[in-house]
Amino acid sequence: MRIALKSRKENVNLRLEEMLRKLKERDFRVTPQRLAVLKILACSFNHPSVEMIYAEVKKTFPTTSLATVYKTVILLKDLEQVLEIGFPAGCNRYDGNIPQPHPHLICMQCESIIDPDLESFAHVTEELAAETGFKIVSHRLDFFGICPACLKKKR
Amino acid sequence: MRIALKSRKENVNLRLEEMLRKLKERDFRVTPQRLAVLKILACSFNHPSVEMIYAEVKKTFPTTSLATVYKTVILLKDLEQVLEIGFPAGCNRYDGNIPQPHPHLICMQCESIIDPDLESFAHVTEELAAETGFKIVSHRLDFFGICPACLKKKR
DNA sequence: TTGGCTGCAAATATTTTGCACTGGC
DNA sequence: GCCAGTGCAAAATATTTGCAGCCAA
């Protein structure tokens, strides 16, 4: 979260362009609904759920269906343009701003999710591969806790 | 996985005793069905799903219901005697042998889950807390890949 | 004895899917 | 104009819950 506002905006535009490029590369169509979902995900600093994306899309396209949002998100996930943060209870969250695996810090009270600054786990992955013989494809690292705002409220 | 067979067996007995102690401490009853689930979880080196536990329990108690297994697993989770490894697609897996958070290595093909040897992440957690102001309660670290056996089969 | 536990079935909730119609390319 | 994409509704699936009867303490 050390990115200045201007470079963050540039980052969002780059992400959107990258998503569009990947879609066109594979001959997927860019419909207005899809574009709306892309835009939301490209600047998804709050790691939205499908429902949150759906609510946002409906503001500009009221007829959009939930199924379409699901399909678009799954498509982007398959294109590795969105990172899924899945939970057993449902209400999965999505990160379209940084689609590569990275640590998340999750508030168990307000359910906010942020991206902490942490050194990469590349070396741990290599160590694991050497030790176990696994071919390691991906990883997931989540920390669960209570955010400063919720800690304050409690008192 | 460097534990010799004898100490592993002792470990399993200790886990079972600990589970029973926690149940009695809080005045939960020890029914035959519950005991069967406890026993399976105490030596759950394969991180079984509820269905797997259910299949196992039915061998000794054919009338056992799936709901009872769910209830028992949830109870043990609440007592922090079982670690839930939840997945968005369902089919959560459970670790009753090591109920504290620890890394898992998951084969994306055969869905086996093992416990790799990795140094603890305690210092990372502390670093995070200091940096973000979060009160960190728990974490989860999963690596996804293909195990040596499945790599072999592919060729 | 008694209230927690079990087992059955029905209910939940999220995500997926089938299909006819629409519209991007 | 073709066929992928959309929207609706129904389906699929894992998990939870209500409740009557049972049994561990």
Image (spheres, coloured by chain):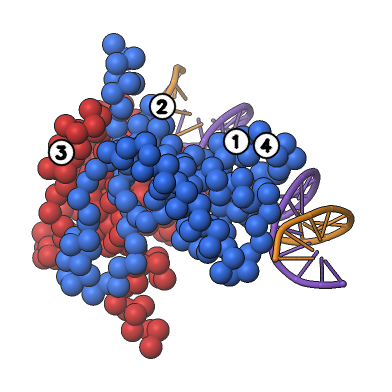
Chain colours: A red, B blue, C purple, D orange
Spatial CA span between label 2 and label 3? 22 Å
Q: Which residue is mark 3?
A: A127
Please give the chain letter of the residue carrying mark 1. B
Circle 1: residue type: Glu
Spatial CA span between label 4 and label 2? 27 Å
Q: Is residue A27 left or right of residue A9?
A: right
Instruction: Tell me whether circle 4 and circle 3 mark residues in contact (CB < 8 Å).
Output: no
Dot 4 and dot 3 within a common chain: no
Foreground label between 2 and 3 = 3
Q: Is residue C1 left or right of residue D9?
A: right
**Secondary element at image label 4:** helix
Q: Residues within 10 Å of mark 1 (few under 14, many from 20)?
A: some
Spatial CA span between label 1 and label 2? 19 Å
| Marked residue nearer the N-terminal end (4 or 2) | 4
Count the marks. Answer: 4
Q: What percent of the width, then of the height, locates residue B47? A: 44, 41
- Residue depicted at 40% across the width and 32% down the height: B112
Foreground label between 1 and 3 = 1
Q: Which residue is mark 4?
A: B60
Foreground label between 4 and 3 = 4
**Secondary element at image label 2:** loop
Question: Which of B100 and B7 lies nearest the eye of the viewer?
Answer: B7
Question: Which of B113 and A83 lies nearest the eye of the viewer?
Answer: B113
Question: Is residue B141 shown above or below B153?
Answer: below
- Residue depicted at 22% across the width and 54% down the height: B120
Which residue is most to the front? B6
Q: Which residue is mark 2?
A: B110
Q: Residues within 10 Å of mark 4 (few under 14, many from 20)?
A: few
Which residue is most to the top? B155
| Marked residue nearer the N-terminal end (1 or 2) | 1
Q: Which residue is mark 1?
A: B56
